[in-house]
Amino acid sequence: MSRYYSYLNTSAGIIRRYNGDQPLAAFLKSFFAANKKYGSKDRKQISHLCYCYYRTGKMFRVHLPSVGKFKLSPVGVPTNRGGPPWAVSSPPTVTKTMGQSEMRPIHASNISADNDTLHAHILAGLFLCSSEPNEMLQQLKPAWNEKVHLSIEEKCEVLNKNFNTESTSQLTIHPSPFTTHCSPLFVFPWQSELSGGIDHSLFCHSFFVQPDLFIRIRPGYKATVQQKLDAGKIQYRLINENCIAFSNTTKLDAVIEADREAVIQDYSSQQVAAFLKPLQGDKKPEVWDCCAASGGKSILAIDTLKNINITVSDIRKSILVNLGKRFTAAGIESYAAKVIDLTTHHSPFTTHHSLFDLIICDAPCSGSGTWGRTPEQLYFWKEEEVLHYTALQKKILTNIIPFIKPGGYLLYITCSVFKEENEATVNEIEAEFNLQLLKMEVLKGYDRKADTMFAALLTLPK
């Protein structure tokens, strides 16, 4: 029994110390490096508990209205269930837009002031994220362990009946305003700010499941990759002709040649290829991947369009060095790379004729469509931060659009689910720069254990 309490206490200590200023994976790595007493099994269990806790998002965080700023109006029929006035059956909506503080979560350092409450929330996260019985729940919450097969809604009802009333020899849960009522819809409470077509309920549910690992098979390597996977007895699912899904913990380094034979790339990110079709067949188009990062979209463009002249840029020299290594592994030798700060008004190119048939702008964003992989970012997210990203996106777009040839294209991409970063930004630049919108789509991944992204293809009329 003590081993499981040790896991619980250690994960609680990590959660209290972690403030979200670096990826949770990096924080955990540093923690275990400084505390070498934990074996591999211990590290795995403690890390899993932490991730389960953060996967509950805003569910166990008190949301109070900002005084005098707006009026909360509950969705559906309010049901307090004997709790405080803010405990309603569905997340509240507001009359103002994102950026004016839709709800105000209390700071993480004030969450779960007593150990019993924090322990309860960690175990509740484990319960919600478990689909099979496990030893820890069996030891500490056997009644919950018997019900892990239930739906998320049914599990929340179990928690609502247990919180504030249960006292056992294994774990005592004291009354607390943090645990009065839980609903999966509280995980991501900004339903009104989602891009069109996103199912809020399904999106919230997706946080309780670890996303898959995806690869994109490069042209000419399908048979080779599948033969290697079969020979290595690696379990996989063939999603389409070129996309394969694996369990997130699958190790592929020793099996396939990364970047040459296949690229690790999320399913939704792979769907961006469909937006490149208007350029297929053009005679060696000039392409600029202006926020190239590690080059995944560039390799996708090369594989899709075949014969192109490509320029890649990023604000970080170090990441372009990494991109160069990936290009070498991928067999890509002919390209231009530039370190460019696209937030400045200075021309990124020295010649007036540096115009492009296609500019790919995979813009810096909230990353909200990828929070299933990094749930700690959802936990620490402050809704006003979207203003920072929309301002940054518009500044970058303003500085790159002048480099589109008449008749050329802009492919705008985010991994965000917020409409302010997506449709609203596209509509604004469309009007301001006389662009014509050809296609705009939310690339949904929340219903297939993948990221959710947004893409829009615009053209500059001749």
Image (cartoon, grey):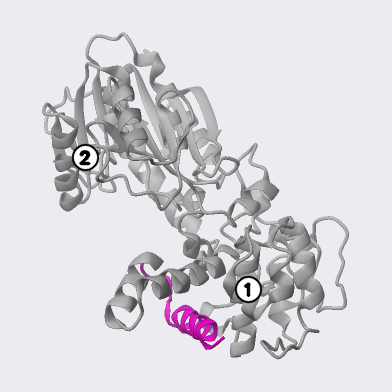
The residue carrying pointer 1 sits among few (fewer than 14), some (14 to 19) or many (20 or more) residues within 10 Å by Cα, namely many
Q: Tell me which residue sits at (28%, 82%) in the image.
A: 34
Which span of residues is magenta-colored?
1-23
Read off the residue under disc 1: 137
What's the residue type where badge 2 is placed?
Ser
Location of residue 203 with respect to 109 vertically, above or below: above
Please state, as top left, top right, bottom left or bottom right, where the C terminus lies in the image.
top left
By secondary structure, the bulk of the magenta-drawn segment is best described as helix
Q: Tell me which residue sits at (25%, 48%) in the image.
A: 344
What's the residue type where badge 1 is placed?
Leu
Q: Which secondary structure lies at badge 2? A: strand
Determine whether, in the image, residue 296 is placed left or right of residue 199.
left
Q: Horizontal and vertical percent for residue 61?
A: 63, 73
Location of residue 352 with respect to 15 vertically, above or below: above
The label number, if any, that marks residue 313 in the structure image: 2
Q: Which secondary structure lies at badge 1? A: helix
Q: Horizontal and vertical percent for residue 83?
A: 83, 78
Q: Are marks 1 and 2 in contact (CB under 8 Å)?
A: no
Q: Is residue 404 visible?
A: no
Determine whether, in the image, residue 216 is placed left or right of residue 76.
left
| Picture quadrant of residue 447 | top right
The residue carrying pointer 2 sits among few (fewer than 14), some (14 to 19) or many (20 or more) residues within 10 Å by Cα, namely many
Please state, as top left, top right, bottom left or bottom right, where the N terminus lies in the image.
bottom right
> Which callout, 1 or 2, points at the residue further toward the start of the chain?
1
Asked if residue 20 is among those painted magenta in the image, a careful observer would answer: yes
Determine whether, in the image, residue 422 is placed left or right of residue 82.
left
Q: Tell me which residue sits at (54%, 37%) in the image.
A: 423
Q: Horizontal and vertical percent for residue 354?
A: 18, 25
| Picture quadrant of residue 150 | bottom right
